[in-house]
Amino acid sequence: MATILETRHADVMPLGHAPQDNYLTHGRGFLSWALTLDHKRIGVMYLCAVCSAFLLGGIFAMLLRTELLMPKNGPEDVFLFTRDAYNQLFTLHGAIMVFLFIIPGIPAALGNFILPIMLGAKDVAFPRLNLCSFYLWLVGALFFVLMLVTGGLDTGWTFYTPYSTSTSTAVVTAVFGAFILGFSSIFTGLNFIVTVHTMRPPGMTWFRMPLFLWAIYSTALVQVLATPVLAITLLLLIAERTLGIGIFDPALGGDPVLFQHFFWFYSHPAVYIMILPAFGVISELITTFSRKHIFGYRFIAYSSVAIAILGFLVWAHHMFVSGQSAISAMVFSAITFTISIPTAIKIFNWLATMYKGSISYATPMCYALAFIFLFTIGGLTGLPLGTLSTDIHLHDTYFVVAHFHYVMMGGTLIAFLGALFYWWPKMFGRMYHERLGQISAVIVFLGFNATFFPQFIMGAKGMPRRYANYLPEYHAWHVASTIGAYTLGIGLVIAAIALIWGLYRGKRAPANPWGSATLEWQCSSPPPHNNFDAPPVVGDPYAIHQLVYDPDQSAWVPRQEKIVESEAMLERHTDAGTTGH
Amino acid sequence: MKRFPQCGCVASDDRTNGSNRKQRNVFMAAHAHDHAEYNPIGHVASKPMLLTVFFLLVGLTALTIWQGTQLELGTWELIIVLVIATAKASLVVLFFMHLRYDKPLNVFAFLSSLLFMSLFIGLTLADAVNYQPEVSAKEEDAASP
Amino acid sequence: MSATADPSTATADPHGTAGHGHGHDDHHEPFLAHHFESWQQQFDAGKLGVWAFLVQEVLFFSGLFCAYAVYRMLHPEVFEYADQFLSVPHGAFNTVVLLFSSLTMAWGVRCAMLGQRNGLIGCLAVTLFCAALFLGVKAYEYSEKYHAQLIWAGADPLTVSPSGMQAGAGHLLELDPEKRAVGEQLEERLASTLHYLEFGMGVVGLLTLAAAVGIYYAKPERIGLAVVFGAISLSAIAIVIGAMASMGIHHMMHASGHEATADSEAEAAHMAEAEDEPPVHTATPGTAEIAGSTHGASVKAELSRPQRLGTFFGIYYAMTGVHALHILGGMVVLTWLLARAVKGHFTPNYFGPVDYVGLYWHLVDLVWIYLFPLLYLIG
């Protein structure tokens, strides 16, 4: 992709102030990418990597939805896959999506690209560590591939003992891969924390930081505080499986419930690693496309940190039926409900931001609106799961599957797509196909609901998750869900076409195509190697009213500059296109 | 005489590093001997301070061994052992790791790790203790068929 | 290396850099990264990064401490029983070794900050030596436990198959039912393992020493490589010394016939008792608790082996093993520092890496400060 872009930049004369030397053209050849320390290139490499992982995980999802088209008569009846193969399918879908896509998705790919520019810094604090994170991700992904070819995995992405210590699949390979991916995530988070603390330019105070940065910062806190516990858990699991260390395996005097505590102490906060960056993205999109200053900036900022911290106090709500004590179940259930407060604060603030705004339905905004709708459903269906009495009925049913897909996919993936469309012009200097983008948003939204809403109903009726077979009464719901999944897949393909079309045929993007006031729109599209040729002017990140649309440049420019320029145009009848900064 | 400005430099450096507390007398005295010990970026640990801390650590180790092997204190034993270990750990953190002279942010970061660790261990332990009777009952059932 | 700041001036005059401490003006300093404005900013960023890394480390270890806490809370009798197999003198020796290495590390940071190159090299070398010494003692302890079959649950035949026990599981039991003899057998086997270790490490030490000297004279410009070989040699020799010292401590304790002999004697007791009554597995916590509280050496023979002894040793090996891995990691970075220190990279403006490695090293010490009483002094 890089070389294509480079040649286009080379043979197309730059318009306006589009720089000849940008991060894409700065250095050529494979090694200039493989050994780059530039956070933007690392971000782009991450983007390609996590999208490949998403494709792989998506293929597994399609296969398992296809298998579920037909109910089977008895254990010998096979539609497409054997029962063992089905167990592998959902495990691989879950493990790949969680460890290789959602967790690094927004922070490592988009965050890497955007965070330093948004902050006004030249780079992240530790560029070499940043590259190291990326290669750790690659090594972790290689272990996953190795696991795929050496027996697969059928434990579910949670690796629960004692099954994970007794199954014959390649658990150790997968677990070691996840261990390495954990360190990739820790180093990314560490880098972002230090960058936000020490690399802010003069004038960039904490409360001038865009909300995306607050969200990424909160995410980074969780990454550094929670992921090491996963690392030691997985290490002990490897020791348990290879040596029989006797900590988690009940046959050796160990305690499997302890494993679940260890695992969820990471994996519940990890849910916030997945969703917090999405909140940050939505805060940016809503304010930009409503042409209104964000409502309740400080509340949104603090609620990100609050979610990050509260997220550590609720992990055992995954274990209500795992044999934990009644008292812990009650305590964790009660704390679980408090999480809804900061989350609701965000939703209400976004709604208040849109209220009386002048909303434009550009593709990113379509995805943002879809996010609010889907995430709200996902969040509200979490309440019956956090309630002890109802969870006993709903636990391990399709209700849970639908719930976390509404949050993880309807939340994080939709926000990821919105962010991708939003920052695509900045990343590659060209606009995507707007109409196709909007169509993709609508199809994804409809397909998503068609896939997962029936699963709420099935789950409430008692359809258990992780089963390859089901009673005939669920047939219609499963068919609806599978058709929805295909629709969703088509929508995602259209989204990919809209973006990739932009790389080849898209209009050249101006520095600020959306009229946002955050710093990344002050530098050219694509940004120069050092991010800013001149030190950026730091102000209120949501002073959107100070930007006006200039049809001559088809870009947004600061209000005063626009006036000055129009006067100059009147006087001299010259093109004002070169003074966009 | 020439070195007095350097001394002033050291003091101001301490302030910028976020340590508002007055230096204790032992270390103050040590400090007075080492006007030459200046670094433009951080606080330089003085020789007497390093040695004092080391010998305190060895002394506390001896104490904890004596206490752990010679005294019978029942349940208090674990608590006392942990108190002494924490005293040793604090010495290492405050002086060897210069946290006493470091930015408040770094102090905060370290304390937060302890907070989250105690949260993890505390809540897990609380649960384990509460579900254990059930596990033990099942184990006894299995042992006596 | 031509751009390296001259270490000799820094040593001679620590104030030389005081006047222009903040390197705003010169961005051509070799170790000031382009995206930082000043040495201070670079240092602060690195330091915060290291603290964040240490936060990560604390939580990494917290999993082990959590497992420890849960099993100790639920099965205190297992821990009290197992404690007699851990040698306090060896643990204490290792504690002092690590504390001393912490002192030299802190001293090394001080030297680096003051631009004292030779002092820094000396301190780093001593720190590295102590780290390897620690591993030598650890190697002794692991071999001893291995030969006494004090091992994690999955490798322990008593835990894995209670029925297999009569069929001669635990080969030591067959050698001689007489306690004394078992103890002596144990020591012989231990000594021979350690001899292999010492011989191997000695060979490695000599070869790497030869390589270091060779490189130093043949290719002086590859001084860094020479230092790396030298560091490996130093570590290998320190491991040998550590193993020999532990054997010495063992003999000393054995000769004095004090409580410390509980070590081998208790092992013997464990063996003998295990043979005497195969179904000890059913030992209830109650009886073990009584046994634990009556501490006399004579009673030990009647102690029944608690069912979860393997779990204790699982936790023991996990905790000390992960800690030892951190020591190994520390030795790698110390070697790296040593090479850079010899090359004279560090100046009063640029001493960050020494400080950061120092912080990591102190954290490893910190973990041991808790591990020692929690494992060796259960009482």
Image (tube, rainbow, N blue to C red):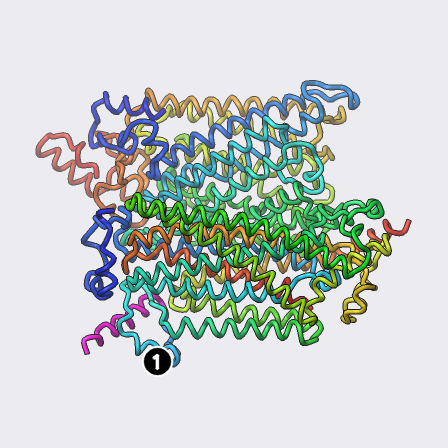
Q: Position of residue B1 (x, y in %)?
A: 19, 79
Q: Residue at x 32, y 69 (%)?
A: B14
Report the side of A177 relative to B134 (left or right): left
Q: Position of residue A558 (x, y in %)?
A: 24, 41
Q: Is A207 part of what is drawn in magenta?
A: no
The residue sitting at the left extreme is A572
Q: Is residue A319 or residue B53 the one in the foreground?
A: B53
Q: Is residue B105 or residue B68 the one in the foreground?
A: B68
Does C300 sit above or below residue A373?
below
Q: Is B15 part of what is drawn in magenta?
A: yes
Report whether residue C10 is seen: yes
Q: Amino acid at mark 1?
A: Ala
Does C107 sit above or below residue B132?
below
- Which image quadrant is residue A172 in? top right
Q: Position of residue A579 (x, y in %)?
A: 17, 36
Q: Is residue B22 or residue B36 the one in the foreground?
A: B36
- Which image quadrant is residue B47 in? bottom left
Circle 1 residue:
B29
Output the chain of dot 1: B
Q: Which residues are magenta?
A: B1-18
Q: Is residue B122 or residue C91 the one in the foreground?
A: C91
The local crowd at label 1, few if under 14, some if 14 to 19, many if 20 or more residues have their Cα within 10 Å, is few
Does A344 sit above or below residue B50?
above
Does A183 sit above or below residue A145?
below
Report whether residue C75 is seen: no
Report the side of A57 relative to A477 (left or right): left
SS of the residue under disc 1: helix
Report the side of C282 relative to B51 (left or right): right
Q: Position of residue A195 (x, y in %)?
A: 36, 49
Q: Residue at x 18, y 75 (%)?
A: B2
Q: Residue at x 45, y 62 (%)?
A: B108
